[in-house]
Image (cartoon, grey):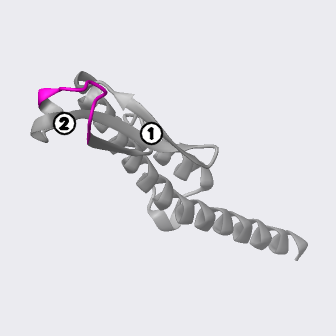
Amino acid sequence: MKHVDSESPSDVARWLQSESATLWPAFLGSLSLRRSRCIRKNCPACQSGEQHQSYVLYGRVNGRRAAVYVPEELVPEVQRSLDNGRALQELLQQAAPRYVNALKRERAEATKSKKSRAV
């Protein structure tokens, strides 16, 4: 791969595509373990204070907070997807300045090329 100071916009796109290829499934949000009471009147778990635990995925849908119940056996896959989402977000943050700098270099080279043809 070219050095970051000489990469083109297409080089940045290829880098991002290559780095993100293994990051599926990926999503943003948070996974929480919550404890809550149930509706049964004489539940031993609720009476002892232990309550009932369940996992919930929290995220945003159309700007509003949304929650989805996650069965315990799916927790490892959901957590891996959240980790992938954070890694993908980090790659996108790295890609932005690299891509803009590559566009600026490309523009400067085009301007320099026009000036040399005009002479």
- Label 1: which secondary element: loop
Q: Quadrant of residue 52?
A: top left
- Residue assigned mark 1: 27
Amino acid carrying label 1: it is Phe
Q: Is residue 84 left or right of residue 9?
A: left
- Label 2: which secondary element: loop
Between 32 and 8, the one nearer to me in the picture: 32
Give the spatial CA distance, label 2 vs label 1: 30 Å
Residue 8 pos. (x, y %)? 59, 56
The answer to whether residue 59 is magenta is no
Q: Residue at x 62, y 64 (%)?
A: 100
Residue stretch rendered in magenta on the structure:
35-44
Question: Which numbered dot is residue 51?
Answer: 2
Mark 2 in CB contact with mark 1 (< 8 angstroms)? no
Q: Is residue 115 left or right of residue 101?
A: right
Amino acid carrying label 2: it is Gln
Q: Residue at x 29, y 24 (%)?
A: 71
Between 79 and 102, the one nearer to me in the picture: 79
